[in-house]
Image (cartoon, rainbow, N blue to C red):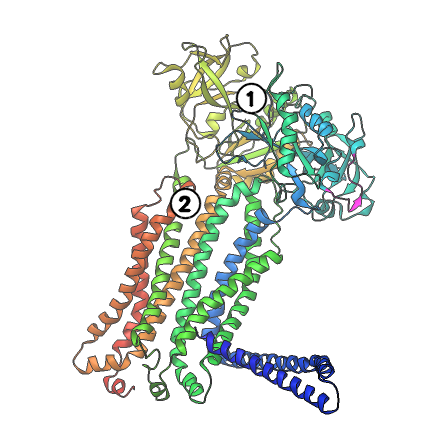
Amino acid sequence: MHWLPRLFRKEQSEKHLDDELRFHLERQVSDYIAAGTPAEEARRRANLDFGGLESIKQETREAHRGDFLDTLAQDIRFGLRTLRKSPVFTTVAILTLALGIGANTAIFSLINAVMLRSLPVPNPRDVVLLRWAARRAPNIMGGYNWEGCPKESGDPAASVPTGCSFSYHMYQQIHTQQTVFSRTSAFIGSSDLRMKVDGRPVKLYGEFVGGDFFSTLGLRAELGRVLDASDDAPGAEPVAVLRYGYWQNQFGSDPAIIGRHVLLESNVVTIVGVAPPAFTGLNPGISDDVWLPLSFHFHLFPDEFRLDNPANTWAEIVARLKPEVTRAQAESAITAIFAPSVISGPDALFKPGDKPRIELPELAHGLVSLREEFSKSLFVLMAAVGLILLIAAANIAGLMLSRAASRQREIAVRLALGARRQRILRQLFTESLMVVIAAAALGILLAYWGASSLAVFLSANWYQPLQIDVHPDPRVLGFTAAIATFVGLFFGLAPGLHSTRVDLTHALKGSAESVNIGSRGEKRSLGLGSALVIAQVALSMVVLVGAGLLVHTLVNLQTMNVGFDTRNILLLSIDPNIRDWKDPRLQYLHRDLQVRLASIPAVLSASYSMVPLLSGGNMDTMFQALRTPIKSRIRSDELPVGTRFFETMHVELLGGRTFNAADFEAEAKPRPVIVNQMLARLLFGETNPIGQFFSDFGSKTVDYEVIGLVADAKYAALRSGVKPTAYLPLKVGGASFELRTAGEPKALIPVVRAAVSEVNSNVLITEIRTQTEQIDRTLYQERLLASLSSLFGVLALGLACIGLYGLLAYEVTRRTHEIGVRMALGAAQRDVLRLVVWRGLSLAAIGAVIGVAATVGLTRYLESLLYGVNPVDPVTLAGVAALLFVVAIAACYIPARRATRVDPMIALRYE
């Protein structure tokens, strides 16, 4: 309630001005009456003059404001001099807070870029994405689950199947029959494309969109024009709109690009426009390089999407609501179009009881690909850096408490000379804010560097380059200002109130007992400092245990047995420039490349597969054993491979044989297949699987003959358990190559590139990396969390150590007289050493106990991020506690040694 006297003085000042105003008003009325003016006229004229008297009051208020600004300037000048006199404290305080503020701002910058930033389109809240929801999944023949579709239904009562892919027939119906949207368009998720620029092939990512895509979003071209309805008409000449950044990087911002013809997927395409600089696509952070009409996609891939089949869903639909239409009204209107079409007819996708409906999630922040991928990790990191900031603030508050002891004579003199306590408190608080402002400025620089580094790391481990814009914007700067203000209040206000409670008698004599002598005496001083240290230790315990669990998870994943030898393998992904996956030239190309790569002297073996192992991609299917009823189905992974695949990957052959060249030529059934142990047990029990037969689910013929049995091996990802897997000869589709090398695989990259070019110069190498790098790539979130949490844990431990050291050093200083008395009365040095060390360890123990209790309650939120480790792992808890006590002993040792070297004679004269 220290603000009450100030408020009272302000009210008294305002009352004085009002009394003065009334006095002058009555005097003016009297003057007019004395001059012969009637009373009513005199009062009217005086009231006209009242405005002039009000201006006097306003001038007085402005004078008070001027006094405030003058005193603020004095506070700033005095604060600068004071901070300059304590360079060590100032440097430590600014750097400590800058690390805390910078870490928080860096993580928030990523959250802002990925999750909070709106699409750069007019009125983004009016843009919606169409999503179906039903009680059961639809009967879809050829559905595509493009990334970015929000998974959670708008119905919170139940978890129901949802999806954002629609058939072309449904898109046309909604496009032509709806009355609630001002614009509607369709788009297909990004595809890898190949374009020739100046005679050289380059890879780019293209999105196929409806002709009214840009008009639906309300975007105009930066250069040239955007796509229109005529570009999407059947038989229209292929045209394209480039992303602004791609135009800059690939074409050097050449304005003559408009009207230029390029060769895209062996088709002549005309560049008609460049998109606005801020627009990179509907998926924030995942940039499209070029936008092409939907009709061109049908031309490139005529067999991929069948327009005449309503059960073939492939397109996502974006729309803009009319200004007068609410989202609920639009959902009802579109459901009235959608539901009857999908529950009737021979190709009905749903049954009437499935209650299919349309939901319209807002697209203001774009599609959710990166949000779903990174949100959990980013929020965990945000919680960690939030704890770091609290530890840093508590650390600086403790240092300021210790520093207050050295300034007690200064404060006492100012109080003795008549300075108000509030005035001194404002001065101290101004110093705190100056430290925070300097730390915030440095923190923003550190945050930009840190956020940029994290964005580069995420982009390097994503399947395509990311464009995460982490430049500070008003939201980021506002966040930084908010946490800086909070920190200023946290570490500045409490020590300021504490340091102004000074006993003048002791302080003017230079006594260390002057601070906080009063109703609570010296215990209050120790209570506040001790509470800050305990809080730091407890928060450090939480951060360290979380880091330990995440590091343990990473170690478990990196050291697990995956079923094959991951060392000395080079993975090679290619683009053969053949879009028809049934083209027989693909099979011959794969064999030629395999032979040429295997002939490289340092290559021990070479093979290929549809997708590399542990790349995150996989295919699955349904099988049935011939001895079971027709309805018994077995879900299994399926991987088409080339010859010598198992020999190259060192997957153990347990029985039978591997594939030979004849297996790739045969077309008749049953097809040769190699199964892993798990699939063999499901199909044949304990019977020897070699020579056994089985079928596709629902088939009435014998489809497969088992020619080999191999050991279980991981297929898609490390976190996925081993699944039933069938290996088939790769006859159609693309492939990635695996090379087993005698030495370091990366040393062969130039030779491998030359070998591929020798076989076919049109083949583009899209990616080349080692198997170890491939595994690290799939573990990028685990590596990011483990490394950053470890860094934050070390930082938290260091700050807690500094806080404990500062408190004990302060206590030794203020208890010098007591220590001298103890030693004069016969206390040994080891007794004094034990006294100080015991004090520090007792605080660390209390903080550790509180930290363990908090950890047990908080680490369960990490459970989905862990693998092979319990959220309340006793080994981790014990290890962190032991580390904490070792560091606490180190922090206590120097103050304790200083205490043992106190000269009793000097200490007795200390006061």
- Magenta stretch encompasses residue 209: no
Residue 688 horizontal/vertical position (percent): 37, 14
Residue 249: x and y in percent read: 71, 47
Q: Where 699 sits versus 875, above or below? A: above
For marks 1 and 2, give the CA distance: 41 Å
Q: How many other residues sit within 10 Å of disc 1, few (<14), some (14-19) or many (≥20)? A: many
Residue 153, image x, y percentages:
54, 34
Secondary structure state at the residue bearing disc 1:
loop
- Please name the residue that numbered disc 1 is placed on: 730
For the C terminus, the quadrant is bottom left
Left or right: residue 851 compared with residue 783: left
Amino acid type shown at disc 1: Leu
Can residue 222 be found in the magenta stretch? yes
Residue at the location (49% across, 9% down)?
702
- Is 512 displayed left or right of 580 in the figure? left
Instruction: Check the image and name the residue furthest to the left.
Output: 826
Q: Are marks 1 and 2 in contact (CB under 8 Å)?
A: no
Quadrant of residue 27 within the rendered picture: bottom right
Give the extent of the magenta segment. 218-228
Give the mark nearer the N terminus: 1 vs 2.
Answer: 1
Could you say which disc has been placed on residue 862 in the image?
Answer: 2
